[in-house]
Image (cartoon, rainbow, N blue to C red):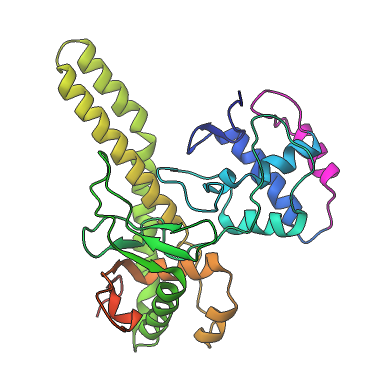
Amino acid sequence: MGGRLTGYASTGVLHPHEAKGLRIAASLLLGESPTTKADVVRSINMQGYRTARGSEWRTSVLMRTLLNPRMAGLDEDGNPIDGHEEAVLTVDERNRLHAKYGAPESAEEGDGPALPREAYDYLATGGLSACGGCQHTMVGARVTGEGAPSYRCPSPTDSAQSCGRVRMTAELLETALGEEVLAELMRPGVRDQLGQIQQDIRDEVARLRVHIQGANQRFTELGDLHGRGLLVKAAFLAAQKATKQDLKDSRSRLRLLEQIEGVDLGHVEDLVAWWNNAPQASRRALVALVVERVYVLPSGHGPHDPHERLNIVWRTKN
């Protein structure tokens, strides 16, 4: 039976020290200066980073781990895993590793198979897009293993009050959204607002970090109240569930906002050229800077303009 995947304390929850070591390794492997895999393994071992089993890293084990789709919060088909709150690597980082190094030849039990094809790096997941019918957050998925990447409202479950009825291909949604964002940025005065928007976001990031850091204390206080008989079991379980959901939502919000902090368009004159050549992570950060949320409306029947299916809530002042 496989053990815990290095980098995660549990599914979708990072082990901070292990994750830091893996991120260092990925940065070295993807850096501009030539670095061999053996040198990277030697470096992280010397810095005291170990596998989840407490062993020193070996080249084959490190590469197998870094190429595991779960390093980027993906399943074996390259779709984002629902409820996977944190990821060691970004999808772009894992794709670049996969393109550069391919699948390793051997593996250690518990680190799983490598993704057989490049995963799709979605532009508007992570809370940026939502179902226009039920307001639930959209997720990235393929209808079949070989299907086109799409955004969909997830099927309803006991814990998710979603409708599962709205879907839009990533190509249509992202092309239309990109065009709308560029048009918004070209409106007179909009780029002048970006500095204040970023400062507001930095303030919210600071508040969220404090709130997340206080989660353990909130859980402890709930347990103490229940243990002293001041909170009946049903109320305790309900409060615990609500606190867990709040923590999950706060972490998701923080990850989204952290992407925006470094956006700098100060020296960009041709926005269209910048957009066409920018990496997906930079485009996603720009979208999140000007868009609070984009609601995807049901398709209806017959031909339609994809722009008409997007109801965008702008951060910029109209």
Placement of 185 over or under 201, stated as above or below: below
**Front one among 123 and 32:** 123
Please indicate, yes or no, whether residue 267 appears anywhere in the rendered image.
no
**Going by the picture, which residue comes out furthest to the top?**
228
| Picture quadrant of residue 34 | bottom right
Q: Is residue 152 left or right of residue 156?
A: right
Does residue 265 show up magenta in the picture?
no
Residue beneath the point at 21% across and 29% down: 239
Locate the C terminus and report the quarter of the image it occupies.
bottom left
Locate the N terminus and report the quarter of the image it occupies.
top right
Placement of 28 over or under 12, stated as above or below: below
Residue 308 point in image, percent of width and height: 28, 80
Residue 280 point in image, percent of width and height: 54, 68
Q: Is residue 267 left or right of residue 188?
A: right
Q: Is residue 232 left or right of residue 153?
A: left
Q: Is residue 108 left or right of residue 220?
A: right
Residue beneath the point at 53% across and 46% down: 75
Residue 132 point in image, percent of width and height: 24, 65
Residue 263 point in image, percent of width and height: 49, 68
Residue beneath the point at 19% across and 10% down: 228
Placement of 144 over or under 18, stated as above or below: below
Total numbered badges shown on the rendered structure: 0
Please indicate, yes or no, whether residue 166 appears anywhere in the rendered image.
yes
Does residue 56 show up magenta in the picture?
yes
Q: Which residues are magenta?
A: 34-57
Placement of 200 over or under 318, stated as above or below: above
| Picture quadrant of residue 176 | bottom left
